[in-house]
Amino acid sequence: MRKASRLFEIIQILRLAKTPVTAAVIAERLEVTVRSVYRDIVALQAMRVPIEGGRGIGYILRPGFDLPPLMFSIEEMEAIVLSLALLERNGDNELKLAAKRVSAKIAGAVPPPLRQTLDANALHAWGFAAPSAAAIDLALLRRAIRDEEKLDLSYRDELGRATERIIRPIALIYYSETANIVAWCELRQAIRNFRSDRIEGCEATGLWFKGEGDGLRRIWVNGWQMNTPAATG
């Protein structure tokens, strides 16, 4: 077990304990040496985690210090950090701003041992960021998927032909170079994929397909399972 994980687990053990917990008990739970526990306790105290006690009598966490209701292990924190970094590579500007807000909220909520994971800047998502979709607001699209609202698309297919489509959007797939909209196309009467970089206009219609989204997604997923993915455009 890595040191950051041990520090987190020690806080958890002491937080839940009703009486002092000896280093030997902590060491047995974490499967480490007692000497490692002593060093970790000193490290936590240096981080101003209010641990009281000593060798032979056990340790307690002073009242008034607690972890937030939502807490993560070190591996879960690393997963969050990397996921937020990956969001920086997509072309959805609203999600990028949301990712920054999430990072700030987490940094302000977690205790020092875990905050170091955020501050270390050791995990990175490499590669080119996808350009923002010029003619479509991906936030509008995500809301349409949630609300099951039809959209009016001005679309240019792979041959450059301009068409007008009424679609029922059911999913959004982010790629490094673009985003793909999965939707029921009322023109084709079938599930189709629409590349965001080929969309020349998109408007909400005020028309709805309430209650149909899950069924359309099952049609789409079953098509993939049968190796018959939706065509483009």
Image: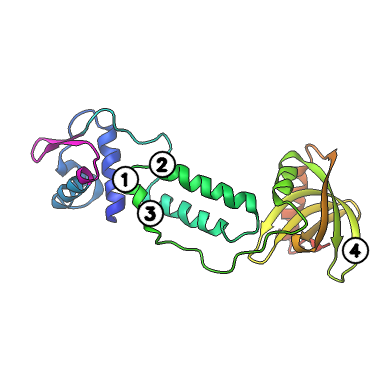
Residue 184 pos. (x, y %): 82, 51
Where is mark 4, residue-wise? 162
| Quarter of the image where one finds residue 10 | top left
Q: Amino acid at mark 2?
A: Gly
Question: Which residue of the protein is positioned furthest toward the left in this rendering?
Answer: 56
Would you say the residues marked 1 and 4 are in contact, meaning their CB atoms lie under 8 Å apart?
Answer: no
Q: Which residue is mark 2?
A: 108
Q: Earlier in the sequence, mark 3 or mark 4?
A: 3
Question: What SS does tag 4 mark?
Answer: strand
Determine whether, in the image, residue 23 is placed left or right of residue 123: left
Q: CA distance from mark 4 to mark 2?
A: 49 Å
Q: Earlier in the sequence, mark 4 or mark 2?
A: 2
Instruction: Give the Cα separation between the discs numbered 1 and 4.
Output: 56 Å
The single residue placed furthest to the bottom in the displayed view is 159
Residue at which label 3 appears:
119
Q: Earlier along the polypeptide chain: callout 1 or callout 4?
A: 1
Q: Residue 12 at what x, y percent from top left? A: 30, 39
Q: Which residue is mark 1?
A: 112
